[in-house]
């Protein structure tokens, strides 16, 4: 935990900026390479600028979240904005609603909360949920899945894989909230119901670049879960 002012922590330390620069360049090169390879081997591939920007910024976001770098949040905002456009164009309304109606908003809350959400307006620490908290987490996913599925069925009949879309949306909503609270269980949700199901969903929709993004998310989530479990130590709430 640092002793810097909240304003300085909000915009990141020198170390965080150095990490941000290196990761941003690395992930840009990876995204360009994947796009190029996809154009050579996938017959149905077509370049989409929103998909590209959302994928690049999403990769940077998840890396910086894993290392608890506060600069993950501005990248996350860019990713949510870009992917919202993309999903709306390929018939996945639930994913568009998730990015524009939720991810954009909650990241504006999570950013300052990481900076001064701890005791005495200090930096937030990584913690784990109690058994009751985990049961509430699962209950919230079930309820939200039903709500989102119903909305998709009513507002966008004939959409692509509405139930799968709804499960991913509901799990992502809860996982993102837990991430903003720095709870270890966030990464459990990113690993399972979010990343695995998203890979299946985007593969079936032909969104191969975003599908690859979620494969990378899965790998990052596995490392992040281990890292955050160590950081949480004995903190349980």
Image (tube, grey):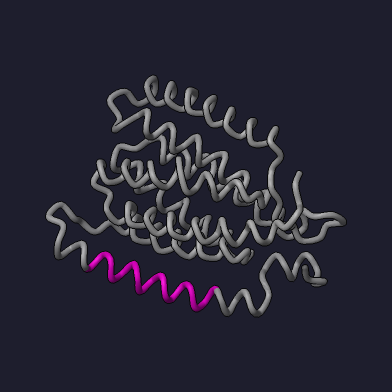
Q: Main secondary structure of the magenta part?
A: helix
* Image spot of residue 9 (x, y percent): 72, 68
Q: Is residue 130 above or below residue 104?
A: above
Magenta stretch holds residue 35: yes
* Image spot of residue 27 (x, y percent): 41, 70
Q: Is residue 15 left or right of residue 164?
A: right
Residue at (61% x, 34% y) in the render: 137
Magenta stretch holds residue 188: no
Q: Residue furthest left?
A: 43
* Nearest to the observer: residue 39 or residue 139: 139
Q: Is residue 234 left or right of residue 30?
A: right
Q: Which residues are magenta?
A: 20-36
Q: Is residue 139 above or below residue 59?
A: above
Position of the N terminus by quadrant: bottom right
Residue at (62% x, 66% y) in the render: 69
Q: Is residue 54 left or right of residue 185?
A: left
Q: Taking the image as drawn, is residue 54 in sight?
A: yes
* Image spot of residue 205 (x, y percent): 26, 42
* Image spot of residue 39 (x, y percent): 18, 63
Q: How many numbered circles does the render carry?
A: 0
Q: Is residue 47 above or below residue 183?
A: below
* Nearest to the observer: residue 233 or residue 155: 233
Residue at (43% x, 76% y) in the render: 25
Q: Residue furthest right?
A: 120
Residue at (63% x, 58% y) in the render: 228
Q: Taking the image as drawn, is residue 109 in sight?
A: no
Position of the C terminus by quadrant: top right
Q: Quadrant of residue 138?
A: top right
């Amino acid at each position: 935990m640092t002793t810097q002012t909240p304003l300085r922590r909000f915009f990141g330390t020198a170390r965080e900026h150095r990490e941000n620069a290196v990761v941003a360049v690395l992930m840009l090169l990876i995204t360009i390479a994947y796009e190029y390879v996809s154009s050579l081997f996938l017959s149905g591939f077509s370049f989409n600028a929103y998909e590209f920007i959302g994928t690049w910024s999403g990769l940077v976001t998840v890396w910086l979240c894993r290392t608890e770098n506060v600069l993950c949040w501005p990248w996350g905002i860019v990713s949510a904005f870009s992917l919202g456009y993309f999903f709306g164009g390929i018939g996945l309304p639930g994913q568009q609603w998730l990015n524009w109606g939720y991810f954009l908003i909650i990241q504006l809350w999570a950013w300052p909360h990481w900076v001064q959400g701890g005791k005495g307006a200090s930096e937030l620490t990584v913690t784990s949920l109690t058994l009751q908290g985990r049961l509430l987490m699962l209950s919230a996913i079930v309820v939200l899945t039903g709500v989102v599925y119903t909305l998709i069925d009513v507002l966008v009949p004939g959409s692509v894989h509405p139930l799968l879309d709804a499960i991913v949306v509901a799990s992502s909503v809860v996982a993102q909230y837990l991430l903003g609270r720095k709870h270890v269980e966030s990464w459990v949700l990113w690993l399972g119901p979010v990343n695995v199901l998203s890979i299946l969903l985007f593969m079936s929709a032909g969104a191969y670049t975003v599908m690859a993004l979620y494969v990378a998310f899965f790998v990052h989530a596995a490392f992040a879960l281990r890292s955050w479990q160590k950081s949480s130590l004995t903190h349980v709430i």
